[in-house]
């Protein structure tokens, strides 16, 4: 476990070992390469490279398994380089660095179109997901990693709560890249006449790298409809524990016809929902403000969802 509180003089040593700056592969090209290390400073756990118009990642299994995120059976990646998917334009710059208080490699990418996208690489290791999510950051020209959450003790010594990634603008100003840090898996069961057997399960999956999946399962029919996309923060009230997000869903997977394979299509559905804490610690309240109804009970009708944490 990395140190939770980092003194100023020690913080930069930690960042140097866990998230190195981008280095040019060849001064005559625009390609970049970076190694991310974990337990061993001499052997990379992940290597990123911009080449052939894409961003490629090589995962080094022997350096990843000792971290304990997955075991050999649940490791989902090949030995050869894999290409990052979903980039909005050719990759121009990137960084792989930790966010939080422990090993947590996050990939942030800047494209030629000026889009900033991110990917949780531990999630990639455990699921094989390689699609980077667009996040709402503008006028970014590069990245750096550094300390976050500064505070001073009574003697004036500066400490930090975590490590993080910053986007840089042309003047060198730093803007922190944020993860989604609340519950990842939210489930709501709907019951018919029999209180022992639910008829429908609604699942809202919100990933740390801002992916959104909304799934409706009609359990007795074994029919499933899934919508995928991204979400982003609109207003975060930490004092009142109420959090509002916008979303855009762009992919539909329809598995309602059991006689054929699931059908996939493009969609464009936008909306707003709000999360807040329930009096029951095992639940989270979801309130659909605009767009999807989410549970069939109408907009602006808060509904409790069972909550759990994942990547």
Image: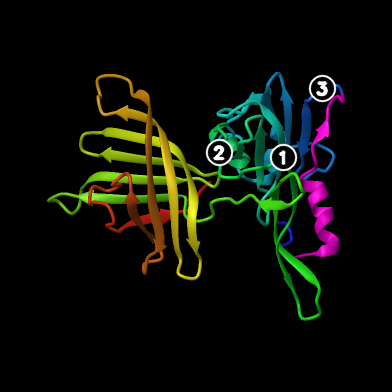
* Residue assigned mark 2: 134
Q: Residue at x 25, y 24 (%)?
A: 258
Q: Residue at x 78, y 36 (%)?
A: 35
Where does residue 21 sit, x and y in percent of width and height?
Answer: 80, 41
> In front: 61, or 113?
113
State yes or no: discs 2 and 1 in contact (Cβ < 8 Å). Answer: no
Mark 2–mark 1 distance (CA, rounded to whole Å): 15 Å
> In front: 11, or 223?
11
**Mark before the other along the chain sequence, 2 or 1:** 2
Using a 10 Å C-alpha cutoff, classify the residue at mark 2 as few (fewer than 14 neighbours), some (14 to 19) or many (20 or more): many
Which image quarter is the N terminus in?
Answer: bottom right
Q: Nearer the viewer, mark 3 or mark 1?
A: 1
Mark 3–mark 1 distance (CA, rounded to whole Å): 18 Å
**Mark before the other along the chain sequence, 2 or 3:** 3
Place residue 97 in its image quadrant: top right
Where does residue 183 sit, x and y in percent of width and height?
Answer: 47, 54
What residue span does the magenta drawing correspond to?
6-27
Left or right relative to 306: residue 170: right
Q: Nearer the viewer, mark 2 or mark 1?
A: 1
**Mark before the other along the chain sequence, 3 or 1:** 3
Q: Name the secondary structure under disc 3.
A: loop
Q: Name the secondary structure under disc 1.
A: loop
Left or right relative to 222: residue 25: right
Where does residue 4 sit, x and y in percent of width and height?
Answer: 70, 63
Using a 10 Å C-alpha cutoff, classify the residue at mark 3 as few (fewer than 14 neighbours), some (14 to 19) or many (20 or more): few
Q: Name the secondary structure under disc 2.
A: strand
State yes or no: discs 2 and 3 in contact (Cβ < 8 Å). Answer: no
Q: Is residue 174 something one can see in this rendering?
A: yes
Mark 2–mark 3 distance (CA, rounded to whole Å): 26 Å
Give residue 29's mark. 3
């Amino acid at each position: 476990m990395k140190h939770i509180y980092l003194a100023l003089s020690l913080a930069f040593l930690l960042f140097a070992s866990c998230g190195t700056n981008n280095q040019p592969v060849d001064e005559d090209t625009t390609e970049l390469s970076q190694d991310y290390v974990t337990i061993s400073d001499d052997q990379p756990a992940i290597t990123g490279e911009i080449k052939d118009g894409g961003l490629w990642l090589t995962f080094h299994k022997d350096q990843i398994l000792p971290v304990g995120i997955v075991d050999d059976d649940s490791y989902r990646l090949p030995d050869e380089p894999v290409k990052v998917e979903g980039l909005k334009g050719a990759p121009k710059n990137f960084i792989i660095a930790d966010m939080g208080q422990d090993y947590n490699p996050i990939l942030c990418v800047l494209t030629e179109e000026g889009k900033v996208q991110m990917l949780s690489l531990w999630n990639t290791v455990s699921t094989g997901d390689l699609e980077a999510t667009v996040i709402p950051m503008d006028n970014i020209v590069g990245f750096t990693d550094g300390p976050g959450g500064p505070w001073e003790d009574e003697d004036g010594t500066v400490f930090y709560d975590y490590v993080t990634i910053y986007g840089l603008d042309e003047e060198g100003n730093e803007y922190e890249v944020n993860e989604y840090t609340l519950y990842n898996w939210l489930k709501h069961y709907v019951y018919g006449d029999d209180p022992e057997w639910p008829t429908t399960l609604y699942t809202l999956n919100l990933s740390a790298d801002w992916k959104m999946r909304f799934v409706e399962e009609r359990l007795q029919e074994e029919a499933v409809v899934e919508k995928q996309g991204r979400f982003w923060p609109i207003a975060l009230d930490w004092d009142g524990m109420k959090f509002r997000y916008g979303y855009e869903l762009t992919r539909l997977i329809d598995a309602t016809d059991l006689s054929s394979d699931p059908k996939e299509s493009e969609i464009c559905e936008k909306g707003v929902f709000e999360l807040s804490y329930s009096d029951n610690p095992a639940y989270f309240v979801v309130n659909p403000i605009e767009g999807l109804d989410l549970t069939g009970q109408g907009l602006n009708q808060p509904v409790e969802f069972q909550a759990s944490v994942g990547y």
